[in-house]
């Protein structure tokens, strides 16, 4: 949602998510259909994702983060050194866009 309101990025959720190579799941060759994943953990994750998205999109609730970028601790993208670290949650590092973008 931070990208949706940022002037540098598209102003819709779908525009941000499907911007060329913005999120790896959109070009990893795997099914993006949530209904295709039926395991117990998939169902829990889907329910949480849907509840959070409802809070964000329809209720205007935010987590208080300004992050516009993130990655797992398993990778080191070329842009990571020019962004400000916003925080770490689990195995993900979140960054706030400042100046570079």
Image (cartoon, rainbow, N blue to C red):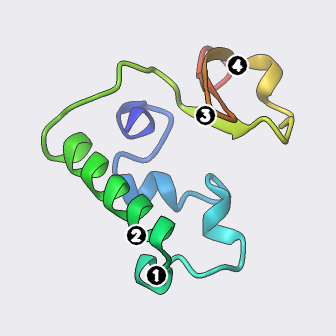
39 vs 80, nearest the viewer: 39
Marks 3 and 4: in contact by CB < 8 Å? yes
As displayed, is residue 70 above or below residue 50? above
Residue annotated with mark 1:
38
Q: Which residue is rendered at x = 43% and y = 57% of the image?
A: 15
Q: Earlier in the sequence, mark 2 or mark 4?
A: 2
Marks 4 and 1 sit apart, C-alpha to C-alpha, by 37 Å
How far apart are labels 4 and 3 at the CA level? 9 Å
Residues at discs 2 and 3 in contact (Cβ within 8 Å)? no
Could you say whether the residue bearing mark 2 is in a helix, strand or loop? helix
Cα distance between the residues tagged 2 and 3 = 26 Å
Horizontal and vertical percent position of residue 49: 37, 55
- Mark in the foreground, 2 or 3: 2
**In terms of sequence position, does the residue under pointer 3 or pointer 1 come before the other?**
1
User: Real-space Cα distance between discs 3 and 1?
Assistant: 29 Å
- Residue drawn 79% across and 30% down? 79
Q: Which mark is residue 43?
A: 2
Q: Which of marks 3 and 4 precedes in the sequence?
A: 3
Q: Residues within 10 Å of mark 2 (few under 14, many from 20)?
A: some
**Residue receiving disc 3:** 69
- Looking at the rendered image, the quarter that the C terminus falls into is top right
Mark number, residue 83? 4
In the image, is residue 92 above or below residue 57?
A: above
């Amino acid at each position: 949602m931070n990208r949706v309101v940022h002037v540098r990025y598209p102003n819709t959720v779908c525009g941000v998510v499907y911007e060329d190579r913005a999120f790896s799941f959109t070009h990893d060759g795997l099914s993006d259909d949530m209904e295709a994943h039926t395991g117990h953990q998939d169902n829990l994750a889907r329910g949480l994702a849907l509840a959070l998205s409802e809070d964000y999109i329809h209720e205007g609730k935010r987590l208080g983060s300004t992050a516009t970028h993130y990655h797992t601790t398993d990778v080191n993208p070329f842009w990571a050194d020019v962004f400000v670290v916003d925080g770490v949650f689990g195995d993900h590092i979140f960054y706030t866009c400042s100046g570079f973008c």
